[in-house]
Structures are given as C-alpha cells and as structure tokens.
Image (cartoon, helix red, strand yellow):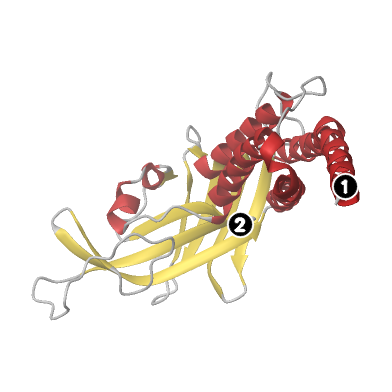
Amino acid sequence: MATAMAATAAERAVLEEEFRWLLADEVHAVLRQLQDILKEASLRFTLPGSSAEGPAKQENFILGSCGTDQVKSVLTLQGNALSQADVNLKMPRNNQLLHFAFREDKQWKLQQIQDARNHVSQAIYLLTNRDQSYQFQTGAEVLKLMDAVMLQLTRARNRLTTPATLTLPELAASGLTRMFAPTLPSDLLVNVYINLNKLCLTVYQLHVLQPNSTKNFRPAGGAVLHSPGAMFEWGSQRLEVSHVHKVECVIPWLNDALVFFTVSLQLCQQLKDKISVFSSYWSYRSF
C-alpha cells in the first residue's frame, strides 16, 4: 500500500511538473504561433500599396458564370469598398443590352470584409495582451483566453461564409440601387456580397403583378439568393422576380484568410485539449 501511494505521489509530481511547463512554455509558444498566423491573415485585408497615408490599392475582378452570359461585370475592390462597378446585362427576351456603372463620386462598403478584419484585430489584441512575461496560473485561465480568441475567429469566418439574408423590399430600399448611372430601371434589383472566398453579384429582373392576377400573392421572406417566382410589395405595386442572374469571382486573399482562420482555430482547440487532459488528473489544484 505504501509503495502504491508513493508511486501515486511520484506520478502526481511528474504531472504537476509537466503541467507547470505547459503553462510556462508551451502555452506561450502556441500564442506566438497564433499571433504570427493572424498577423498574416490581417495583412491579407490590407492590400499591397495601402497605408494610413493613402488609399488602398485597387483590384479589378471580372465576374462571370459558366452557365450564362446574360450578365458580365467588372467590379473594382479598394480595401473593404467597391470603388467602381461596370455591369452589362443582356435582356433574355429581346437581347437588348443594358449597361450601368457606379457614379464616380460613390463607393459601396462591403461590411462583411470590414467586420472580419475587425474580429481578426480583436483576436490579435487578446493574444498580445498575454505576452511572454505573463504567467498563467491555472488551466482555466488558458481555456478562457482560447475561448475568447476562438469566438473572434469564428465570427470573422462567419462574416465571410454567411452573407446577410435580405428581403426583396430591403434590397429595393438599399443604397446600392442609387449607386448607378444611369439610374437602374425600376424592374431591376442588384445585390453584391461576399460568400466564402468569392465576390458575388446578383441581378434580379422583375415584373409587375396585375391587380387581376390569379396568382396567390405570398411575399417572400429573407434570403441570400431569391429564386424566380419570389414576390414582394413595393410602394403600391406587387412585383415578382422573373429572372435571376448571378456571377462571381474568387478573391485569392480572402481564400488565404479563411485558411489562416481554420489553422488558428485548430491550434486553439489542440491547446484546449492538452489543458483538459491534465485537468482530469489534477483538477483539485489547477481548475
């Protein structure tokens, strides 16, 4: 019995020593690694040539679809804003070509990009607040920090992977509709958003439902992408989506950022798992 108790005490001493090493050394090594990765992610949101002294560099993206040539567009991204947009739409019925572009005095902010960048910055702030000189006393303290960092990274990723759902009246009321010259025809709606690593443009063609229409009017709810047949009321008219045209283009640096988010989340989870292993043996002193 005495031998078993001595062995248990020795094992606990070894575990305690390993746990103290984990808190003092390995945790900080992981935090430095996370900082390096997230700084790289943050740089992806700060385009080459941009600085506090001048505007961000412009990038042109040609949006297209392998399934249709009804819409062709060139969008110019400057930081987190669309500074230019050039859209050509071929009307399905008569092949009439419509062209509209942003007014020169207008830019459209992509809030998804700005929000993602803000969340990355907050994650970096949390990590730098625990520099090498900081002494973690308990595993619970590390878990709390990892949870806070993971929350910011998850929010950053979700802002890019989960575009806002909008109703058709919300799209009609959006300031985006007033960005173009010439003014968009009343039977067109547009939406621009980020989905994963892609810049997406959707053009909706509408037609007015006549008062004597036999169609059962059911207003559509919120959606990222509405389908033909979706109905809504705008002003004194009832309208229906007749055609939907979506084009997109990959933004390489957003793809990089998403990879960095995934790697960072995995590192955070791995550190949490290591802490949890010790907790099952040493919970009465460290948690």
**Farthest residue, direction front:** 1
Q: Which element carries disc 1, helix, strand or loop?
A: helix
Reading the image, the residue beneath label 2 is 196
Q: Position of residue 36 (x, y in %)?
A: 81, 36
* Residue at the (82%, 23%) spot, across then down: 132
* Residue nearer the viewer, 266 or 86: 266
Specify few, some or many for label 1: CA neighbours under 10 Å numbering under 14, 14-19, or 20 or more: few
Residue 68, above or below 132: below
Residue type at numbered disc 2: Leu
Q: CA distance from mark 1 to mark 2?
A: 61 Å
* Residue nearer the viewer, 224 or 89: 224
Residue type at numbered disc 1: Ala
* Residue at the (59%, 61%) spot, across then down: 248
Disc number lying in front (1 or 2): 1
Reading the image, the residue beneath label 1 is 2
Q: Which element carries disc 2, helix, strand or loop?
A: loop
Res 204 → quadrant: bottom left
